[in-house]
Structures are given as structure tokens and as C-alpha cells.
Image (cartoon, grey):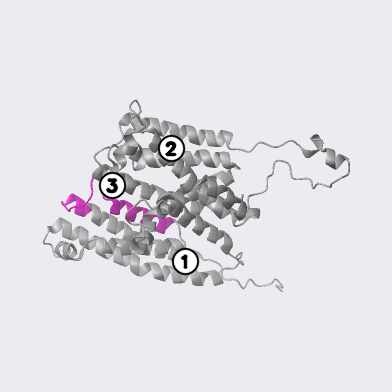
């Protein structure tokens, strides 16, 4: 007689696992079809950026993430990408392309983009609903989500671009709420994602603020010297005051302005990376040194930053008349590598000597009783301390 307790949990059978894979493959295939459609339109002579249309890159990255990272947030992102793909073509040009007025090749590509994006847009909400409902059927209880940690991640993603771009109030978009909110679609991947990655790498590698500052400097040099190349531009975006800020401290041998180096790289160190990380970590000082992301989160953040950087680089190469030379690019890349290496080597905090080895006259005399701190551990700064220190510096 079998007295064993029956297992009432419903296991994940191979058929169910295979169904999940095919469910995720449908929106991924739709996004990939849209990317191929954009490439076909470009080959057929459509007025698209060359040599690689940014829309094709975005749809390809979204397709890979949708297929490999099966998460509700990924499917929400794929749905948003599909919406942007459908709205990317003006209405009059869309009707002309779909109707074949611009050629058969452009018509085929336009129809592929339309059908692929529509498939991803229609299938994304279904996957989100299924993912929510599947959580209650799992045979093992799930750990309750840490909403405060998620709030910190979201806060850093938004705070980094706000500090980097909006607080300076230098652009004509200042005061236009709709434009500023829309700009976060590109600024969050461009600033928020690398801030999150730098913070995550630093905490996983047990790096202190020296390491974070050095990696922030590497990011600033990457952004200004390799991505938008504003550090080496002689007339960036035709800004009226550009020549004045460039010529005053221009170093002819390097082809750059010392003022711009301090402004761009130093600005990224303080406002894009360090200040947002310090403020967000001060929200929970007791858990400031804990990692936030898993492998999936690291992949998503890296993909977002690489995609945004490619878009900015493509725009800079196609719209700007002054770019970095080969020597300037090689030199910048070499300095970036040195900064990252220095962050790894110098960023680890040195262990302080044991309190027992340091005589304390007051404690020896019995006047006070001091708690013994942990060796090599310093308390994380709180919000008020961080703010009061950051305000005069800023």
C-alpha cells in the first residue's frame, strides 16, 4: 500500500514549457519582421538614415530581448517599441508606401513593418496577462517583491537624466513638460542605464566611491568623446556660445577645450552618475551596498545603453560637420580603458586598522564607553548628510 503523500502541485511539463517559448517567439518574430522591413525599404531607396537605419537596430534589439528575457516588463517594452514603429512614418508617406506609389520594394518593406509591429503590439498584452496569472500556479512560493528596491532602481533611472540634462536648463525645451517627459525615452537609456550599471558593478566588485568616481569619469569621456563627440567638435549643434567656450582654453595639440573637458566630463561625474547614486542609496542607508540587479537586469540595462549610444552616434555622424579624428577616438578609448582599470585597482576601500591597535585615552580612563565598529566598514551617508554636502559642491 502506497502511503506517500501525493504531490498536488502542477509541474511544468515539456508541453507547457514549449508553449511558453512559442508564445514569446511570436512578438519577437513580429519585431524582427519589422526590422527586416525597414532594411528592405532602405535598400529600395526610401529616405531613411544610412548605412544602418536606427529603427532596424531598435527593433532587432527589442526582438532579441523579447525572445531571451521572458518578463512582463520586457513585453511592455516591446509593445512600446511597436507603437513607436507604427508612429514613425507620417500618415501621407505611409499611405503612399503601402499603396506602392514609391515602388514595390518600399511597399513590401512597409507592409512587413506594419504587420510585424502590429503582431508584436497585439501579442504583448496577452503575454503580460499570462505572466501575471502564471505566478499563482507555480509549485513553489515566490518571495515577496522588494518594492523599495524597485523604487530605487526606477528613481536612479529617472534621476540620472534629470540631473544630467534638465536641471541645467540650457536647452530650449526647458519648461515644455510634454517634451521633457518624452525626452526621457532616450535619456533614461542614455544616462539612467549606465548609472545603474556603474552602481551595480561597483557594489558587486566591492568598490568604494573612488571606483564609482573613476568609472563615472570613464562614462563621461565615452559620452563626450566617443558617442556624441562634442568634446572634439568645433561647432556642436551650432550653439551660439560654443566658439566662446571653445577658444578661451583651446589646446591645439589635443584639439579640444580644457573648459569643455571640465564641463562635460566633470558634469557627467557629478550630475549624471555620482549625485543620483548617492541620493538614491541614501534612501536606504542600511542596504546601500547591496546589488540590485540579476543577470537579466544587467542584460537589459546594457542593451538599452548600447542602443541609445548607437542612435546618438548615428545622429552625430549624419547631422554634425565636425567630428573626432581617428587619433582622438583612439586616445579617448585608451583613456577610458585606463580609467576603468584604475577604478578596479584603486576603488577597493582600504581596511582601517583594528580599533584595538589605536589607543583611546578617554576610553582607557573610563570616561566614555565607545561601541566597537566593524573593521573596514563605514556607515553609509543619510539623505540629510548627502544633501547638505552636495548642495555647496553643486
Given the current orientation, which residue lies at the most extreme right position? 366
Residue under circle 2?
A: 262
Q: Nearer the viewer, mark 2 or mark 3?
A: 2
Seen at 55% across and 36% down, the residue is: 344
* Majority SS type along the magenta span: helix
- Displayed quadrant of residue 343: top right
> Which numbered disc flags the more N-terminal residue, 2 or 3?
2
Position of residue 393 in the picture relative to residue 100 (left or right):
right
Q: Name which of mark 3 and mark 1 comes first in the sequence.
A: 1
Which disc number belongs to residue 315? 3
Residue at 39 percent of width and 67 percent of height: 124
Mark with earlier residue (2, 1)? 1
Depth check, front residue: 50 or 238? 238
Q: Which residue is mark 1?
A: 15
Mark 2 is surrounded, within 10 Å at the Cα level, by few (under 14), some (14 to 19) or many (20 or more) other residues, namely: few
Q: Which residues are magenta?
A: 40-68
Q: Residues within 10 Å of mark 3 (few under 14, many from 20)?
A: some
Amino acid at each position: 500500500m502506497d502511503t506517500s503523500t501525493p504531490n498536488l502541485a502542477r509541474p511544468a511539463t515539456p508541453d507547457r514549457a514549449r508553449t511558453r517559448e512559442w508564445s514569446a517567439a511570436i512578438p519577437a518574430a513580429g519585431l524582427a519582421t519589422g526590422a527586416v522591413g525597414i532594411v528592405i525599404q532602405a535598400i529600395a531607396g526610401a529616405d531613411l538614415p544610412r548605412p544602418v537605419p536606427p529603427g532596424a537596430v531598435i527593433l532587432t534589439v527589442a526582438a532579441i530581448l523579447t525572445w531571451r528575457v521572458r518578463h512582463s516588463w520586457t513585453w511592455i517594452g516591446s509593445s512600446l517599441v511597436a507603437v513607436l514603429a507604427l508612429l514613425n512614418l507620417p500618415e501621407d508617406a505611409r499611405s503612399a508606401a503601402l499603396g506602392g506609389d514609391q515602388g514595390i520594394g518600399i511597399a513590401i518593406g512597409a507592409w512587413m513593418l506594419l504587420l510585424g509591429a502590429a503582431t508584436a503590439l497585439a501579442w504583448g498584452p496577452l503575454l503580460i496577462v499570462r505572466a501575471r496569472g502564471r505566478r499563482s500556479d507555480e509549485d513553489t512560493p515566490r518571495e515577496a517583491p522588494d518594492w523599495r528596491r524597485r523604487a530605487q532602481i526606477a528613481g536612479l533611472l529617472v534621476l540620472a537624466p534629470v540631473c544630467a540634462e534638465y536641471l541645467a536648463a540650457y536647452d530650449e525645451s526647458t519648461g515644455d513638460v510634454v517634451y521633457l517627459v518624452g525626452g526621457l525615452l532616450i535619456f533614461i537609456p542614455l544616462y539612467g542605464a549606465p548609472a545603474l550599471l556603474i552602481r551595480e558593478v561597483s557594489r558587486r566588485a566591492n568598490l568604494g566611491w573612488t571606483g564609482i568616481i573613476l568609472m563615472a569619469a570613464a562614462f563621461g569621456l565615452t559620452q563626450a568623446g566617443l558617442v556624441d563627440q562634442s568634446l572634439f567638435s568645433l561647432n556642436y549643434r551650432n550653439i551660439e556660445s560654443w566658439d566662446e567656450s571653445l577658444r578661451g582654453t583651446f589646446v591645439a595639440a589635443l584639439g579640444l577645450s580644457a573648459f569643455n573637458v571640465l564641463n562635460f566630463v566633470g558634469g557627467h561625474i557629478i550630475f549624471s552618475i555620482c549625485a543620483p547614486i548617492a541620493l538614491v542609496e541614501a534612501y536606504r542607508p542600511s542596504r546601500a551596498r547591496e546589488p540590485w540587479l540579476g543577470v537579466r537586469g544587467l542584460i537589459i540595462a546594457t542593451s538599452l545603453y548600447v542602443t541609445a549610444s548607437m542612435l546618438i552616434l548615428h545622429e552625430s555622424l549624419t547631422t554634425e560637420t565636425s567630428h573626432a579624428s581617428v587619433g582622438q577616438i583612439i586616445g579617448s578609448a585608451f583613456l577610458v580603458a585606463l580609467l576603468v582599470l584604475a577604478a578596479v585597482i584603486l576603488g577597493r576601500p582600504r581596511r582601517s586598522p583594528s580599533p584595538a591597535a589605536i589607543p583611546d585615552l578617554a576610553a582607557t580612563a573610563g570616561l566614555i564607553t565607545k561601541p566597537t565598529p566593524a573593521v573596514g566598514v563605514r556607515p553609509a551617508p543619510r539623505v540629510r548628510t548627502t544633501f547638505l554636502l552636495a548642495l555647496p559642491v553643486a
